Structures are given as structure tokens and as C-alpha cells.
């Protein structure tokens, strides 16, 4: 496994491998790697000849300087973690390497980035689109692997690929959970011991809501989820929306579409947790 920091180096290496007919899979990350990332790398390894993992804490997608500052960073530990995986290259550029000059591009994703995460973290998805498009341009992978935990991000990346004609297959990878159900996230290590014990209830209630949904409307299901979570000390729901999994528009009736996802953000003390649940999945 090689660790490269310069754009020229990674481009040269990947171009050579591509000219030899190798399929290149790409897993973009911001580091602080955990088993959720590892599962993306494993899936990438099973579908590609070469796996590139980028580790870059992208400043343009943070709308809070405090959040950016306290985002966990440890390249050495991440590299050691990836050694046991199918990763062939780590691309760990500096901010200057990715943004030699300020990136002023404004992306238009219509309604997709105005709601849910986009509403509460204005500019977040523009920053994600800036960095992902930069990384796609540098690495030019055949396939890129994104976790379903960031469901809205996944939908927006698919739109980015369509809009800018990237010849890249976007592969959605299932959420990896801790034994108690909590969706794995780099931010989980910021939870205090006390609050860490409370948060598995989020996934638990989302799961219970799939049964509740069988006999109740989307709006009643939404209320069930929000009220059940907010009964728990330290948890405050920022949003919970039951949406069409393609357009991300809130649905009013279950039979409006064949792909329905419930997306949630919860403040657990001062840590923000996001998760989701599929009510109807048109893929299966
Ligand atoms: O999902 C993430 O970790 C980030 O948003 C991504 C895709 C690596 C872009 O910085």
C-alpha cells in the first residue's frame, strides 16, 4: 500500500494502471477511519482491481469552524488501519494540493441540497461537490463507493455524475452498525460515555417505525419517531423526513413511490448523529 500526497504522483500511477486494463475503485473519506469505511474498501476491493482511498478533511464542506477544528485526524493510525484491507493507494493531499486557489464554484442541485442536511448545514453539499469533483478529476476512477448512511449525499453525488457527465459508476454501500445498532461514524468517538449509552435507541426506533408504518400514514410515522426519540434524555431531533429515495421530496402517502427512506439527524448532547431507514426499496 502506497501513501501519496501529490496530485501528479497519484495521477501518474493510476493512469499507468488504467492503461494496463485495471479497474480502479475509489473510496473518498475524511479519515478517522472505522469499520464502516473498511466495509466500503472491502466492497471496492471485490469490484475493482485497484482500490484508492482518499483521506482529506475538506474544509469547504464544514459550515462550523468548531466542527472543522474538532474533526478527528490521525493519518498514521488510518494508514495502519488500512494496511489490513484491500487498499492499494492512500491519497492524502494537503488543502493547497486540492485547492491551489479558492474554489468559488457554485453547484445547482435544485431541491436536492436545500432540504434536510442542506437546510441545517447551508453550503455543506456545495463543499462536498467541490471536493468530490476535484477528486474525481484527479483519480478518474471507474467506480466510486459511498455509504448509504449519508443518504442525501449519495443522491447528490449521483446527480453530480449525471450533470457533469462523469463516466463513473456510483456504488451505494449499506450502513455498517455497531453491535448495539448505532450507525458507525467518525463522530461517534466524540460522544460522552453517558450519551453513548443512549444513542442506540435512534436505530432501534427507526427499525420499530417500519412496523408502525404498516398501519399508519407517513406523517403519523414521522411523529412516532420524533416523539419516541425526544423522550430520551440528551436526544433532540433536528429533522426526520420520510422522502422519495430518488427525489428526496417528502411523501404524503406510502403508495406515491416504490422507494421510501426516512432520514434523520439527532443532536446527542453536542454531537450530531445521522441515520436512515428504508421503508420501501425499489432496488430489492
Ligand atoms: O462522506 C464523507 O466522508 C465526505 O463527505 C466525502 C465524500 C469524503 C467528501 O469529503
Image (cartoon, grey):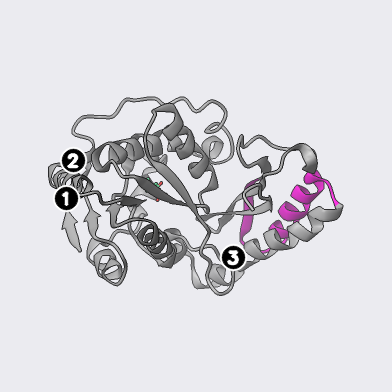
Q: Which mark is residue 199?
A: 3
The picture places residue 34, in percent across and down from the top left corner, at 39, 66
Report helix, strand or loop for mark 3: loop
Position above or below: 137 against 26: above
Q: Is residue 233 inside the magenta stretch?
A: yes
Camera-nearest residue between 144 and 93: 144
* Disc 1 from disc 2: Cα separation: 8 Å
* Disc 1 from disc 3: Cα separation: 36 Å
Q: Are marks 1 and 2 in contact (CB under 8 Å)?
A: yes
Q: Which residue is mark 2?
A: 97
Kindly tell me whether mark 3's CB lies below 8 Å from ligand 1: no
Q: Quadrant of the N terminus?
A: bottom left
Mark 1 or mark 2: name the one nearer the start of the chain.
Answer: 1
Query: Residue 123, located in which quarter of the rendered image?
Result: top left
The picture places residue 230, in percent across and down from the top left corner, at 70, 57
Residue placed at 74% from the left, 63% from the top? Answer: 208
Position above or below: 173 against 116: below
Report helix, strand or loop for mark 2: helix
- Circle 1 Cα neighbour tier, 10 Å, few/some/many (<14 / 14–19 / ≥20): some
Position above or below: 120 against 144: above
Q: Which residue is mark 1?
A: 5
Q: What range is drawn magenta here?
A: 216-240
Mark 1 or mark 3: name the one nearer the start of the chain.
Answer: 1
Q: Is residue 232 inside the magenta stretch?
A: yes
Q: Which mark is residue 191?
A: none
The picture places residue 200, in percent across and down from the top left corner, at 60, 67
Viewer-nearest of discs 1 and 3: 1
Camera-nearest residue between 73 and 277: 277
Amino acid at each position: 500500500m502506497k501513501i501519496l500526497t501529490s496530485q501528479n504522483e497519484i495521477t501518474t500511477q493510476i493512469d499507468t494502471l488504467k492503461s494496463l486494463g485495471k479497474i480502479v475503485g475509489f473510496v473518498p473519506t475524511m479519515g478517522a477511519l472505522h469499520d464502516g469505511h473498511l466495509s466500503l474498501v472491502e466492497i471496492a476491493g471485490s469490484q475493482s482491481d485497484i482500490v484508492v482511498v482518499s483521506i482529506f478533511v475538506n474544509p469547504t464542506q464544514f459550515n462550523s469552524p468548531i466542527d472543522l477544528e474538532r474533526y478527528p485526524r490521525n493519518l498514521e493510525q488510518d494508514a495502519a488501519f488500512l494496511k489490513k484491507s484491500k487498499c492499494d493507494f492512500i491519497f492524502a493531499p494537503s488543502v493547497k494540493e486540492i485547492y491551489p486557489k479558492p474554489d468559488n464554484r457554485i453547484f445547482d442541485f435544485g431541491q436536492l441540497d436545500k432540504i434536510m442536511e442542506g437546510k441545517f448545514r447551508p453550503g455543506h453539499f456545495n463543499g462536498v461537490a467541490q471536493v468530490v469533483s476535484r477528486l474525481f478529476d484527479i483519480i478518474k476512477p471507474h467506480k466510486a463507493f459511498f455509504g448509504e448512511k449519508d443518504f442525501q449525499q449519495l443522491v447528490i453525488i449521483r446527480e453530480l455524475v449525471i450533470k457533469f457527465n462523469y463516466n463513473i459508476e456510483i456504488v451505494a454501500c449499506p450502513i455498517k452498525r455497531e453491535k448495539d445498532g448505532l450507525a458507525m461514524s467518525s463522530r461517534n468517538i466524540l460522544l460522552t460515555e453517558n450519551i453513548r449509552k443512549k444513542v442506540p435507541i435512534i436505530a432501534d426506533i427507526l427499525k420499530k417505525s417500519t412496523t408502525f408504518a404498516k398501519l399508519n400514514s407517513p406523517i403519523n410515522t414521522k411523529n412516532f419517531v420524533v416523539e419516541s426519540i425526544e423522550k430520551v434524555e440528551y436526544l433532540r431531533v433536528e429533522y426526520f423526513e420520510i422522502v422519495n429515495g430518488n427525489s428526496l421530496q417528502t411523501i404524503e402517502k406510502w403508495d406515491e413511490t416504490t422507494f421510501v427512506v426516512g432520514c434523520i439527524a439527532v443532536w446527542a448532547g453536542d454531537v450530531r448523529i445521522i441515520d436512515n431507514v428504508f421503508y420501501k426499496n425499489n432496488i430489492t
